[in-house]
Image (cartoon, rainbow, N blue to C red):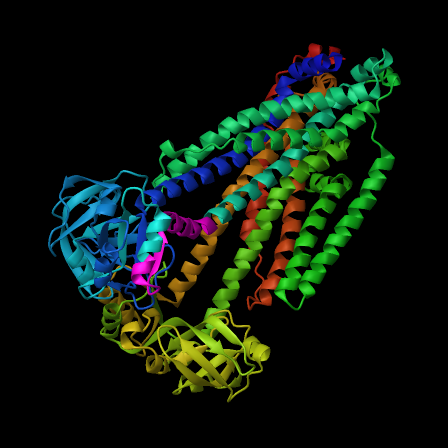
Amino acid sequence: MTVLKTSMRNFLAHKGRMALSAVAVLLSVAFVCGTLVFTDTMNTTFDKLFAATSSDVTVSAKGASDSGETTSDNGKPPVIPDSVLGEVRGADGVKSAEGTVFSTSVTVVDGDKDNLSPTSGGPTIVGSWNDNDARTMEITSGAAPEGAGQIMVDADTADKHGLKLGDEIGVITVVGTHTAKISGIADFTVTNPGAAIFYLDTKTAQQVLVGEGGVYTNVNVTAAAGVSDAQLKKNVLAELGGAYKVQTAEETAEANQKDVEGFMSVMKYAMLGFAGIAFLVGIFLIINTFSMLVAQRTREIGLMRAIGSSRKQVNRSVLAEALLLGVVGSILGVGAGVGLAVGLMKLMGQMGMELSTDDLTVAWTTPVAGLVLGVVVTVLAAYLPARRAGRISPMAALRDAGTPADGRAGWIRGVVGLVLTGAGGFALYLAGAADKATDGSLWLGVGVVLSLIGFVVIGPVLASGVVRVLGAVLLRAFGPVGRMAERNALRNPRRTGATGAALMIGLALVACLSVVGSSMVASATEELDKTVGTDFIVQNDNGQLITPQAVEAVKSAPGLERVTEYKWTEADFTTPDGKTLKETAITAADPTYATDLRVETVAGKLADAYRPDSMSVHEDFAEDHGISIGSKIEVAFKDGSTGALTVRAITSSEAVVDAGAMYTSIDTLARYVPADKMPLDTLLFVSAKDGQQEAAYKALKDALHEYPQYTVRDQTDYKEALKDQIGQLLNMIYGLLALAIVVAVLGVVNTLALSVVERTREIGLMRAIGLSRRQLRRMIRMESVVIALFGALLGLGLGMGWGATAQQLLALEGLKVLDIPWPTIIGVFIGSAFVGLFAALVPAFRAGRMNVLNAIATD
């Protein structure tokens, strides 16, 4: 009880000093809990949606995916004949059955030809209005569509694009473009996670989406009273045999959930990873806080030891303070995490993915995980300072506050740090020298971890040298004030090293990712210049296939020399070594593709791969299966027949553009795949006549005005798009890393604040002999700047080393250009100085307001 009372008294006595450490714990726990609540809420939303939209039993074509996705290579959904509907209705236990048609391989435009698809990446669905949809949609204005001239739209899409009753919109499919006027607007009775949904009547949907009547994509079956879904499925299968896919509501919901599960898992664990980085940075803050508090209470602890307190009691007292800090910070963090999750939901709503707070899910494991993690991390971080407190002897009661540095510990730290850093550097060397990226990635991970730990351990040793250099360059110009700032930073190298290390971690990751991202863009740009021999590329940015009508529109544009079609499909390969490779990708293109893409070959000529019944393979594939020029591969095409194709070319496996592709001609593909099953084009490569590039560029854009889902890019546009994509990804990662950097800034603030308290008497004496308030504040600001720059220098140097090694691994995959983004690196370094200035504002202000006499009288 005495230990607890002492801990409570000390905690409350230093509550201001504990506040910043508590904020670090709060932020880290909030990020963990916010991530868990947000992802759990999204799972709940999708679970409710899939459960509400799934009929008791669904019958679909064998070619449909388990989740009911209807996009196919030829742009038409897999269908079943209407006779199946009659057979299903005759099965035992069927209360009702209804045929429906829907497709996601569509584009919907308004009267100005603007795309109405969601910008959040959600699907655009066009289907027939049916009783199953009526369970989750309520018509709030107008009426359901009747006849070819009417269409209904969901309320979210109508609100976003300002659509109203009577507006004309167009549905673009592989069949053609169908226009209709809005007859009704329907609102979701469940949460809409971001889809745009349009409804036609059944007959119109069949003609618009499939191009023929008397077919359905699904038959939705409702069970009679007392009949389970499993029994109903068994009865339907007995009636239909195995010709069709039959799923219960639970199976359909599970399949749909799997579609989003991968994305959800990646997002969840990525965000938790960044929360872990914030926790790691917070550990340094907590260690520094307790180390300085213990040092400041040296005399007090010595007196406690002199009157009978044991080492264990002192140790437990400090750990109890850490426990209190962890509990308070974690409880506040759990509450802040729920608020963060709600904020993320609102942000997703702005991006088009509507998530309702009614579905907010806080599982009991979330606050428990946050509390346990926050408390455990805080107590562990305080363990070393607590041990140090326990070693204080009763004789310390006779000394001034503060403990002398432990020279032996510093020597040991230096040796251990050098060993770890050397081991990390050697692992990075092995990673860069690896022959295979998979082997090198393991060494890269080991090198990153060891070099990071090594730099953290050796930080106090490095602080003495680096701070002196920074002081000579930056601080000496400020005269005595600058020299005092330098000496203050050097006074306790362990503290300076730990504070700088907190900032180092976040900036090292920023520098590493900047180098990797910049190198990827530079490598891809160089590869495009070397290999792409066409003027323009036409594609859909979301992977949607190009309809025949759009292809014809492109070919009709004036000023073009050639248009190369590019298709992608799957086939089962039987190679000369007797192995059968299922669902292997094969690319079919026009023979002019050999000119449009200058692919390096190691044997044969790529142009020969476009001869009848011919193909190419890449070098690694050829080596793995004993293939040479003239070898024959038995290719069973998806939705087609089987042919024996002769290998006419072997391409280099080091290509970046179309890496690992195996080519054949469209004519060869057409020989084995029926016309109605031929895959649509994935890309179009367009070359203009000499001297007409600018006019052709405009003509292509005009030709595709009716098809806004497709983008025309010249090589400059394509490079900019690539740069933007990588830039957006990096910006998102930088945003998540900002949490760790914020915690690191709190560490600098806390270190300075405690340092000011520690130096109260010293500050009073300096003020007494003539140091002005302005000079005092400047001294503290400069001390903060030099600590921040110390951390930035270590972090940026370490991160560039990691990034350069990672680029060596990327070079094995064809990305051979190392590009150091110096503007970013220099900008971050300069920004770190401003971070130091910002962190020093409050401590410097408080120091300047000290009463001189009271400060001198401080014990």
* 683 vs 751, nearest the viewer: 683
Please determine whether, in this image, residue 405 is positioned above or below residue 155: above
The quadrant of the image that shows the N terminus is: top right
* 745 vs 3, nearest the viewer: 3
Quadrant of residue 21 within the rendered picture: top right
Question: In the image, is residue 612 part of the stretch drawn in magenta?
Answer: no
Extent of the magenta region: 237-263
Q: In the image, what residue occupies the spot 60% across and 29% down?
A: 840
Q: In the image, what residue occupies the spot 27% across and 38% down?
A: 189
**Left-right relation of 451 to 705:** right
The quadrant of the image that shows the C terminus is: top right
**Left-right relation of 327 to 287:** left
The percent position of residue 444, horizontal first and vertical second, equals 66, 56
Q: In the image, what residue occupies the spot 36% across and 73% down?
A: 566
Q: Does the image show residue 422?
A: yes
| Marker count (numbered) | 0
**Left-right relation of 105 to 597:** left
The percent position of residue 360, horizontal first and vertical second, equals 41, 33
Question: In the image, is residue 257 part of the stretch drawn in magenta?
Answer: yes
Q: Main secondary structure of the magenta part?
A: helix
* 775 vs 533, nearest the viewer: 533
Please determine whether, in this image, residue 223 is positioned above or below residue 579: above
Q: Does the image show residue 481?
A: no
The percent position of residue 249, horizontal first and vertical second, equals 35, 48
* 326 vs 507, nearest the viewer: 326
